[in-house]
Amino acid sequence: MIKFITLCFLCITIISCKEEVKTKQVVKNTTQVISIAKDTIKKTDYKILFKNNPEYVSNGFDFPVGKPDAKNYYNAQKFQENNHLGDDWNGVGGGNSDLGDAIYAIGNGYISEVKDYSGGWGNVLRIVHLKNNTLYESLYAHCDTILVSENQFVKKGDKIATIGNNSGQYWAHLHLEVRDSVNLDIGPGYSNDISGYLDPTQFIKKNRK
């Protein structure tokens, strides 16, 4: 009788352990699914933000310096010149003559990131824009000071930062990128693969109000 009871106890213990392992595995898999789902719906989240704040949907785009037409600035290194993934806006005075000059939001949008990436990037901010139900992202690099915060909405022409020289690594200028794929990594700045990137000047000219 004692042997029978002991055997029953062992069977119950083994079954319980198997169920516990199975339960842990299910929880683990569910966590992975939730994580993937969050990544998948990120773009939808932005569209919901704009749906709830329609006054910040883009109604056109302007240049980020010398607003609205880049007066007294020139494009020193154009998109895909030397495999460049953006435009470099310099003051016509050259050198550091434009250090501390204003940088403006090219369009209505949502500040998705403000970060010091150090290295060749320095202070960077990104704005997500919605126009004609399509998401775009503008990226402003080498900033001296940043005047906005993450999770803040801005309007076209708002002063968002000032032109910097990345702690003296370059002559002062603004590196501007426009992307049609939001939430990409910071990126290399230079590449002949332009997947997810747009010519900033062409984009702005095509989408003037």
Image (cartoon, rainbow, N blue to C red):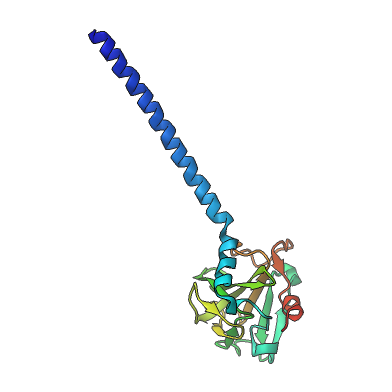
Give the quarter of the figure containing the C terminus. Answer: bottom right
Image: 116 above or below 23:
below
Which quadrant of the structure image shows residue 186?
bottom right
Q: Position of residue 57 (x, y in %)?
A: 62, 76
Q: Position of residue 8 (x, y in %)?
A: 31, 15
Which residue occupies the foreground of this view, 172 or 7?
7
**Farthest residue in the left direction?**
2
Q: Viewed as shown, does residue 94 lie left or right of 101?
A: right
**Res. 168 in view:** no
Q: Viewed as shown, does residue 198 lie left or right of 146?
A: right
Which residue occupies the foreground of this view, 81 or 207?
207
Q: Position of residue 26 (x, y in %)?
A: 46, 37
Image: 26 above or below 161:
above
Which residue occupies the foreground of this view, 133 or 73?
133
Q: Viewed as shown, does residue 179 lie left or right of 146?
A: right
Give the quarter of the figure containing the N terminus. Answer: top left
Which residue occupies the foreground of this view, 55 or 140?
55
Which quadrant of the structure image shows residue 63?
bottom right
**Res. 195 in view:** yes
